[in-house]
Amino acid sequence: MVFTPDSSTQEEILKGSLGRTGNLRAPTLRVGKVFYVGYNEEMYKELMG
């Protein structure tokens, strides 16, 4: 999923990015202003070159 943050998507973003304990799902990667939450092998290969 890709989210574009604004006031109408805040709750949806939180539901998609927080785990049962209330912490960010693992792994979480920050690249500039973009956060990647969760694991997707294809995405990581693309990000790492």
Image (cartoon, grey):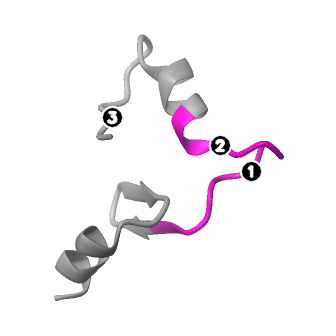
Please determine whether, in this image, residue 48 is positioned above or below residue 10. below
Helix, strand or loop at mark 1: loop
Q: Which residue is at 52% across, 36% downward?
A: 16
The mark that comes first in sequence, 1 or 2, is 2
Point out the residue furthest to the front here.
41
Residue at numbered disc 2: 18
Mark 1 to mark 3 CA distance (whole Å): 18 Å
Point out the residue furthest to the top here.
8
Q: Residue 10 vs residue 18: left or right? A: left
Q: Which residue is at 62% across, 55% downward?
A: 25
Point out the residue furthest to the right here.
21
Residue at numbered disc 1: 23
Disc 3 residue type? Phe
* Region of the chain picked out in magenta, as a range: 16-29
Q: Which residue is at 78% across, 42% downward?
A: 20
Residue at numbered disc 3: 3
Mark 1 to mark 2 CA distance (whole Å): 5 Å
Please determine whether, in this image, residue 1 is positioned above or below residue 32. above
